[in-house]
Amino acid sequence: MRFASIGLIVMAFLGFPCEMYGGDLRLGPLRIIPYITASGRYTDNVFLTGSNEKSDFTYSVLPGVKLRIPTLGRYGFHLNYEADFSQYDTYHEANYFVQSAEAALDLNLPKRFGVKLGDKITSGADLPDFEGDRKARYLSNRARIGTSYAFFDRYSLGLHYSHELKDYQRSVDEIDNYDTQSLGGVFRFRFLARTSMFIEYVRADTNYRKDRDVENSYSNQITSGITWDITAKTHGTVRGGYIGKNYYALNREEDAVFASANISHELTSRTIFTLSGIRSLFDTSQADNNIIYSSSYLSNQASVGLHHTYRKFTGGIGGDFIYDRYLYDDLRAMKKRKDTVWRGYVGIDYQMQRWIKIGVQYRYTNLNSNFDNEDYVENLGLFFMGLTL
């Protein structure tokens, strides 16, 4: 793995792959876009622990391919596949191999009907929690379908359904196996050329399939918001509403104010500012023994970023803030767990050629909890090289 990563970088600087990536690959209307990224990362805290931190270097190779059929009349199709190979120098139990494949089909049917179909399959692993621990490998799948109907040029109605499941290989991890089905509807009203208001309702049912029936639940979420392109430089979606979750066996209901935002603004033709955030309820992980803290938690998350391009260079700086509040007392300490996470990054990319990009980045993470055994700090540096047709 190490020699493959270094070899790709050396070949790129010597210019050997130029002919290989010199033009598009096409089969009729199908466009094939192969790509590969080689990277190296150094972390001073492999297992994200608060004491006795372990440092290591990781070599990664991520090949992939994208298949595209540009919209032909009423139809559009894409298929993505990628595999991520990563190897640690010292702590080989943290090595991982992740594969994912995703397909989507858009159908614009007559009389203003639209249908979107999609499916994503992932074979992955949760990283080990400590030295000598084993990875928790899993297979997940998420299928979705959505329909829409537009009328009177300003209004549209939509329905969407999704089915998501996750299966772990080891019996000790199977407590986190789940099956979630969601069904929802949305009504939109366009009151400006590029600005719409909407109201949406989603019902979701989650079932855990082994030794965790007590956590089976259903949730109802109703939100309204606005999606806009007020100018050619500003795009975004902001929504707010209510989410309520009911646990069957516990005979318990949890609810919260839901909010989310995704905003992008071009400060100049070369500078982009992004802002995103979410406030919602989430279930805890049982395989990591978080059941002792609470069955669910309320998370408040915010992220900002600023990216500037100068000729072939693109620099970026940004950060995240996360505040998680568990809703029930820890069974041993008899107090509620609260976590605060700060993350930041700074990096720069260089587009050497149309088909090759290199870059470096530094990332910092600090998790502070009122449970001291959950605290950790990580400093991570990485370099990468990407080749794209």
Image (cartoon, rainbow, N blue to C red):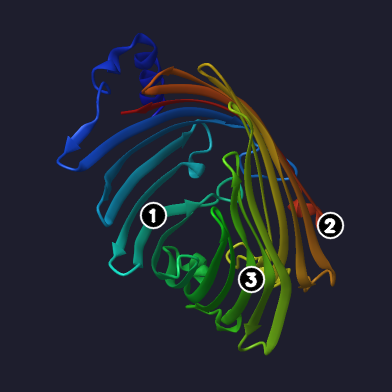
In this rendering, the label closer to the viewer, 3 or 1: 3
Q: Are marks 1 and 2 in contact (CB under 8 Å)?
A: no
Image-based side of 74 in relation to 267, left or right: left
Residue carrying label 3: 223
Label 3 vs 2, first from the N-terminus:
3
Residue carrying label 1: 123
Q: Position of residue 284 (x, y in %)?
A: 64, 67
Quarter-wise, where is residue 169 in the image? bottom left
> Residue drawn at (57%, 40%), measured in percent from left and top?
232
Q: From this viewpoint, which residue is outermost toward the front?
A: 152
Report the front residue among 75 and 312: 75
Image-based side of 267 in relation to 185, left or right: right
Residue carrying label 2: 370
Quarter-wise, where is residue 9 in the image? top left
Q: Is residue 26 above or below residue 235?
A: above
Q: Position of residue 203 (x, y in %)?
A: 54, 79
